[in-house]
């Protein structure tokens, strides 16, 4: 899922300190799983902000809520009343939710309460690791299920590089060499011959490099009535 | 093997052991440093590499320095990493280099930018080194750019790549990687600097067993130790470097003021031994910030004077 | 043991300090507490294995929040003791009360009282 972390409290305070009707909007989706923007976090943030204003001797009304997710208009619609009564909103959904909330309530001031990082897995409680770079043309079939784009620091398709050292990436001993992982997997699968043939340059146009992306699934859209069909 | 005007290619084809070295450009726009370093090594080498923002530290660019060397009458090897440039910029630089008669390139993926002085930079890595090799081969042999455009004049590049026999996961995979680079079009290889000769020999044997030694010319990389401190640094802090304890011990046994001399001696001995290894077609001397010692190494290894072709 | 300890301490009993969440600490301050301390079992002796270790982390987070908003990290604290350490309990209670007395009333409580007036 998408992984995010709460922004430092002082940064959030700097955004909203001059407002006095604030809504903290959380999300029950990805940010709940990574404990950055769910109901628990919304409550803590709201309580912290209340304490802040009280300690300053300032009046403020802080409300908190979550919706099922902020990347779907039908759930954002549920926020209508709360949004109306707020003069500033802190969304602690992921970057997608924050933006979609803003788009759907364009007259409201919305601030981000989290930093959104990557698509990753839950390794253990509080430990998340990136696994997918969203390149738009998945190559996992040829690398034993390990992504060279997300897990190689140089996104090589013909790795490893000369800096692969004892299974670690040259950038840090904390980072496994993605190509070492691929090698180990392909060895276990008996597919080491894949290392003999050069892999051609990637088409990056399907990734972020091609510009902001949009998917239209025609198969999911309503069909147009056939010619001469009855209405 | 294609025929290019490359002097390096000609020397190797003629059956001589080739010698290349490198010049690290300055961290300023003062080109005189390049002139100076080039003058120190020019009679002792067949071709001179110019590094490309090595360890991600901004330096005067390799292309400009190579042009300078070419105009001075030397034979440059343009090193190009894929870290900082996309395929558009790389193909463009290749055409630029070829327009000045530069005929040698070394294709590298490049150190990650976190090593250098601009760790906050975005990296590119549109291609990796193997794909860069493929690109140059296509430009040279088919006259086409990656996007399909047919060029009026083809860059005549002798294509090189680097390989590190000492990096992970194991020697066998490093030999497979070499096979892949050769399949992509690599014609000469400059290896990472060698200190662990038995391991290097193991790798070379695998190369020979695969019949690759007839398809690609391996230039053994060597770097003399300036001091015990340098040896220790290389052993512990540089990824992919394999320095046996015996070498550290040998330097330890020598007083500080004699360590540089011992380092040169050790390097020459290594070169003598490597000369005898099947498949080794020459040397790539990386005397980083110690270019004045290249002459001593080349002479000591019995490789002076350089043959004329 | 019938030891004396300050009367200004409002005790909330929990089966394990692992039950104490960050929000509870913040709510206590919101409701006018001048100081909050969490007294858990000795580390390694938690009946529920790690409850007291989680509690320590949460107290740490509360300290950061209180620092950021200008209330001060010293108003919240984590202590560890065993159920049998009656005198240690009294000592903690006295120590913490003295610390909070030294810091004065919580700015939150001051603001509340001003408002009420």
Image (cartoon, coloured by chain):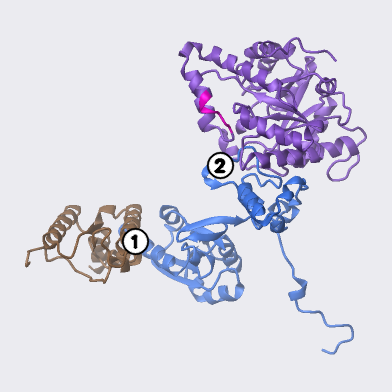
Chain colours: A blue, B purple, C brown
x, y percentage for residue A77? Answer: 57, 75
CA separation in Å, label 2 and label 1: 35 Å
Tell me if A81 is positioned left or right of B146 in this view.
Answer: left
> What is the crowding at mark 2: few (fewer than 14 residues within 10 Å), some, or many (at least 20)?
some
Query: Which residue is at a point 81% across and 79% down the rendered structure image?
Result: A224
Closest to the observer: C47 or C15?
A: C47
Q: Is residue A117 visible?
A: no
Magenta part of the protein: which range? B241-246
For mark 1, what is the residue? C54
Report the number of numbered marks.
Answer: 2
For mark 2, what is the residue? A166
Closest to the observer: C60 or B44?
A: B44
- Chain bearing mark 1: C
- Chain bearing mark 2: A
x, y percentage for residue A57? Answer: 31, 59
x, y percentage for residue A114? Answer: 50, 58
Dot 1: element? helix
């Amino acid at each position: 899922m998408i992984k995010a972390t709460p922004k430092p409290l002082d940064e959030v305070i700097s955004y909203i300190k001059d407002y006095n009707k604030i809504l903290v909007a959380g999300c029950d989706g990805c940010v709940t799983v990574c404990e950055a923007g769910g109901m628990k976090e919304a409550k803590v943030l709201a309580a912290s902000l209340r304490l802040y204003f009280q300690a300053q001797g300032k009046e403020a009304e802080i409300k908190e809520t979550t919706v099922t997710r902020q990347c779907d208009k039908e759930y954002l619609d549920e926020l209508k009343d709360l949004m109306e009564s707020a003069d500033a909103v802190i969304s602690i959904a992921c970057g997608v939710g924050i933006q979609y909330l803003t788009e759907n309530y364009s007259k409201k001031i919305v601030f981000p309460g989290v930093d959104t990082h990557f698509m990753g897995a839950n390794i253990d409680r509080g430990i998340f690791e990136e696994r997918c770079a969203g390149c738009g043309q998945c190559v996992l079939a040829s690398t034993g299920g390990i992504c060279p784009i997300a897990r190689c620091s140089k996104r090589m398709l013909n790795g490893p590089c000369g800096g692969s050292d004892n299974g670690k990436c040259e950038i840090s001993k904390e980072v496994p060499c993605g190509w070492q992982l691929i090698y180990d997997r392909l060895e276990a699968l008996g597919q080491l011959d894949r290392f003999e043939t050069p892999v051609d340059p990637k088409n990056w146009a399907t990734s972020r490099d091609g510009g902001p992306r949009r998917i239209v699934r025609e198969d999911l859209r309503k069909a147009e009535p056939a010619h001469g069909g009855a209405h | 093997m294609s025929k290019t005007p490359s002097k390096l290619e000609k020397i190797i084809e003629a059956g001589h052991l080739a010698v290349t070295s490198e010049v690290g450009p300055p961290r300023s726009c003062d080109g005189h440093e390049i002139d100076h370093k080039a003058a120190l090594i020019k009679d002792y080498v067949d071709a001179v590499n110019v590094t490309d923002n090595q360890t991600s530290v901004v330096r005067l660019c390799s292309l400009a320095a190579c042009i300078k060397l070419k105009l001075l009458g030397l034979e440059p090897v343009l090193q190009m990493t894929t870290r900082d440039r996309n395929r558009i910029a790389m193909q463009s630089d290749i055409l630029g280099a070829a327009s000045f008669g530069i005929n040698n390139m070394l294709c590298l993926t490049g150190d990650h930018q976190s090593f250098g002085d601009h760790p906050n930079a975005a990296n590119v890595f549109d291609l990796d080194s193997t794909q860069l090799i493929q690109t140059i081969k296509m430009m040279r042999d088919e006259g086409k750019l990656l996007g399909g455009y047919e060029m009026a004049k083809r860059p005549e590049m002798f294509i090189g790549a680097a390989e590190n026999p000492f990096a992970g996961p194991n020697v066998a995979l490093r030999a497979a990687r070499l096979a892949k680079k050769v399949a992509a079009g690599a014609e000469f290889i400059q290896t990472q600097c060698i200190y662990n000769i038995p391991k290097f020999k193991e790798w070379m044997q695998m190369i020979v067993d695969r019949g690759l030694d007839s398809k690609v010319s391996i230039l053994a990389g060597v770097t003399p130790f300036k001091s015990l401190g340098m040896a220790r640094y290389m052993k512990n802090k540089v990824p992919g470097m394999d320095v046996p304890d015996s070498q550290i011990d040998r330097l330890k046994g020598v007083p500080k003021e004699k360590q540089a001399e011992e380092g040169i001696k050790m390097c020459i001995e290594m070169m003598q031994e490597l000369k005898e290894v099947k498949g080794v077609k020459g040397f790539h001397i990386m005397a980083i910030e110690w270019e004045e010692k290249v002459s001593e190494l080349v002479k000591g290894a019995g490789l002076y004077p350089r043959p004329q072709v | 043991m019938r030891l004396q300890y300050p009367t200004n301490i409002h005790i909330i009993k929990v089966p394990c300090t692992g039950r104490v969440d960050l929000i509870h600490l913040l709510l206590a301050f919101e409701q006018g507490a001048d100081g909050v301390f969490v007294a858990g079992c000795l580390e390694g002796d938690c009946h529920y294995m790690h409850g007291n270790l989680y509690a320590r982390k949460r107290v740490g987070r509360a300290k950061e929040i209180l620092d950021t908003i200008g209330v001060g990290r010293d108003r919240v604290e984590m202590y560890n003791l065993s159920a049998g350490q009656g005198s240690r309990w009294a000592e903690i209670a006295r120590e913490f009360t003295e610390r909070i007395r030294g810091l004065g009333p919580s700015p939150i409580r001051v603001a509340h009282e001003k408002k009420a007036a």
